[in-house]
Amino acid sequence: MYQEEDAVYRTVCECHCIPISNFHSTTRMANTVTKEISYEELKALVGKSPKLILIDVRSEEEVAKGHIPGSINIPLSTVEGALKMDPDEFKVRYGVTKPQLDAPELVFHCQIGKRGAMATTKAHELGYVNARNYAGAYSEWSKKEGK
């Protein structure tokens, strides 16, 4: 019995798990890093703001089933490389001007919010200071838009 408990302890320690007592404070700290935008805020921008750059980080297959109007598809696995691209290369690849580091309306989204948050965090790490995540994601958008 002692050997089993010892093995579990070593496994937990080796994977650097967060103690449960610290989980909620760590989650709060992570949420403060990712700025979010609500459905209502995004709805007010879609089709109306020429400054909106809406990036859908879902796979091409997911996007083929439906998307938010005006969004461009940059799958999560390629976001970092895309944001590091030369502006001319970005324009050729995605058909839009590459966002500036201080772009006021740079929004990422996915299907349920997690990948969008990851992309937003990556954008912040690369210097995109105003990047936001649409946490409601396409699932909320499609429900509210009746699609």
Image (cartoon, rainbow, N blue to C red):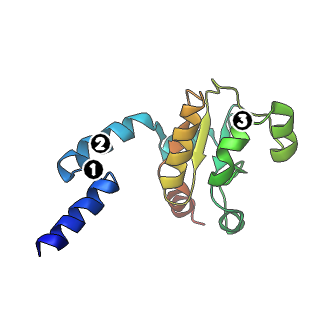
Amino acid type of the residue that numbered disc 3 sits on in the rendered structure = Lys
Quadrant location, the N terminus: bottom left
Asked if residue 24 lies left or right of residue 137, the reply is left
Regarding mark 2 in the picture, which secondary structure is present there?
Answer: helix
Distance from disc 1 to disc 3, alpha carbons, whole Å, reads 32 Å
Q: What residue sits right under mark 2 in the picture?
A: 26
Q: Amino acid at mark 2?
A: Thr
Q: Which residue is tagged 3?
A: 84
Q: Looking at the rendered structure, which numbered label has been put on residue 18?
A: 1
Q: Residue furthest bottom?
A: 1
In what quadrant of the picture does the C terminus appear?
bottom right
For the residues bearing labels 2 and 3, Cβ distance under 8 angstroms: no
Left or right of 27 in this view: 112 = right
Give the crowd class for mark 2: few <14, some 14-19, many >=20 residues within 10 Å.
few
Left or right placement of residue 56 versus residue 91 in this view: left
SS type, badge 1: loop
User: Given contact means CB atoms under 8 Å apart, are the residues at marks 1 and 2 in contact?
Assistant: yes
Q: Residue at x 66, y 59 (%)?
A: 67
